[in-house]
Image (tube, grey):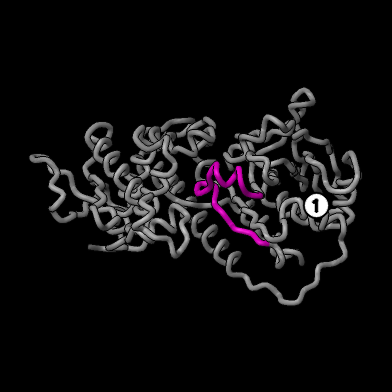
Amino acid sequence: MSQGNGTRIADARRLLVERVAASSYLNRSARLRDLLHYLAERVLDEDAGEIREHEVGQKVFGRPRDYDTTADNIVRVHASMLRKRLEQYFATEGLDEPVVIEIPKGNYAPVFHERSKTAPLDPSEPATPVAPASPPLWKRVSPLKIAVGLAVLFACSTLFLLTKRPMAAGIAAAKRPSVQLFWSRIFVPGRTTDIVLDDSSVALFEELQGRSISLSEYFDRSYLRTLPGAKGDAEMDAETASTLMLRRQASYSGVSFAWKLTEMPEFASWRQMLRFARDYSFRELKANNSLLVGNGRTNPWIQPFEPKLGIRWQYDKSGGVYFPVDSFNSGKSYQSAAHEGYCSLALLPNLGGTGNVLIVSGTGGSALNAAADFLADERAVSRLRAGLPGSGEFPYFEALIRLGGRSTLPRDSTIVLARAVRK
């Protein structure tokens, strides 16, 4: 089997997994979806031939390393439920699927079988890898796919460098009381903060399809049902749509902002976890401190907080950029002039009231870079705090900042508005 053919088979199977996860049999059960995704990824990404119960208990259900599988049957119970749901899907909604998924008993590694056209599926038959018929590769390459591929390559390489970047030892944080006061609301000693990068795949899909995807659609993946033949101002064939949605890629803006954080002296002392929006969950948003990068369209996890905020981000299709609108001020919009940009900051309690969330949005990569510089500058952050009510720690707030060109300093930026937000 050629490498290209093997890649096409794996991509076809990944899309099959997404269709199953988005089906009515699984889309309401986050645990069953998580279980299916973990098992499928171990097989498709790591070529696992055997997956044991103990591993699944740890990785999917958060059990400790020394937990006793004989006393705790959580994996067996959910695996049994998943097997039943898979059977139901392939007998109803997935009746026309050319390949079916089974999870054998005693070994949790999924098996992909070609569906027999003349007889019912025999679980004892060996798996036969198949791929949907497709035209030659050179006929399927489009400028859109090239752009997506380059974005994937850039995002993956940048994230690798970000997570592997060595930290200079012994760097003492500068005396920046306002900066440290601000970040102490997000990065708390002894507690890990999730840095959740945006999803450029879903943003591009929205732009091409001409509609926004709600968080509920994003979380349960029900929007994937509309992939084949999805149409907006441009038409997407099913293969192009699946290419978009199967790739995990953050935007340059989001990755660049996260990279900027690593340059802060305080970063070495922060406990943080870099996350991708598609892998995040309501449970984590309720329990953890989070830094959400993007806006409600590019990072749907921001949507639950929007009712408390006046600043909304809208997409300018003609210019291909996002711009802020103040819904609390008659929908006043702020269009960027040449060499300028805008960013918004919002500090809010998390969904569970157990921690805090910082939302950072911007007109583009340069704006988010400038926002990171702003939040590392003592004079700039001090001005921000002075414009908010009360004293002491930063209250819950939202702010809109107009940022100058590359040659300007953070302290030269303009705080357009800063207002407190009620819990």
Instruction: Locate residue 40 relative to residue 377 in the image: left or right.
Output: left
For residue 170, above or below residue 75: below
* Quarter of the image with the C terminus in it: top right
Q: Is residue 118 or residue 332 the one in the foreground?
A: 118
| Secondary structure type for disc 1 | helix
The structure residue drawn at horizontal position 42% and vertical position 47%, both measured from the top left corner, is 34
In the rendered structure, does residue 285 fall within the stretch colored magenta? yes
Read off the magenta span.
Answer: 271-289
The structure residue drawn at horizontal position 36% and vertical position 63%, both measured from the top left corner, is 46
Say what amino acid the circle numbered 1 marks.
Answer: Phe
Q: Find residue 351 and report its image quarter.
A: top right
Point out the residue furthest to the bottom here: 170
The spot of residue 347 in percent (x, y) is: 74, 43
Q: Is residue 360 visible?
A: no
Instruction: Locate residue 153 relative to residue 333 in the image: left or right.
Output: left
Instruction: Locate residue 206 relative to residue 171 in the image: left or right.
Output: left
The residue beneath circle 1 is 182
Q: Is residue 188 visible?
A: yes
The spot of residue 312 in percent (x, y) is: 69, 33
Q: Is residue 239 or residue 180 the one in the foreground?
A: 180
Structural crowding at the residue carrying mark 1, measured as other residues with C-alpha within 10 Å and reported as few (<14), some (14–19) or many (≥20) = many
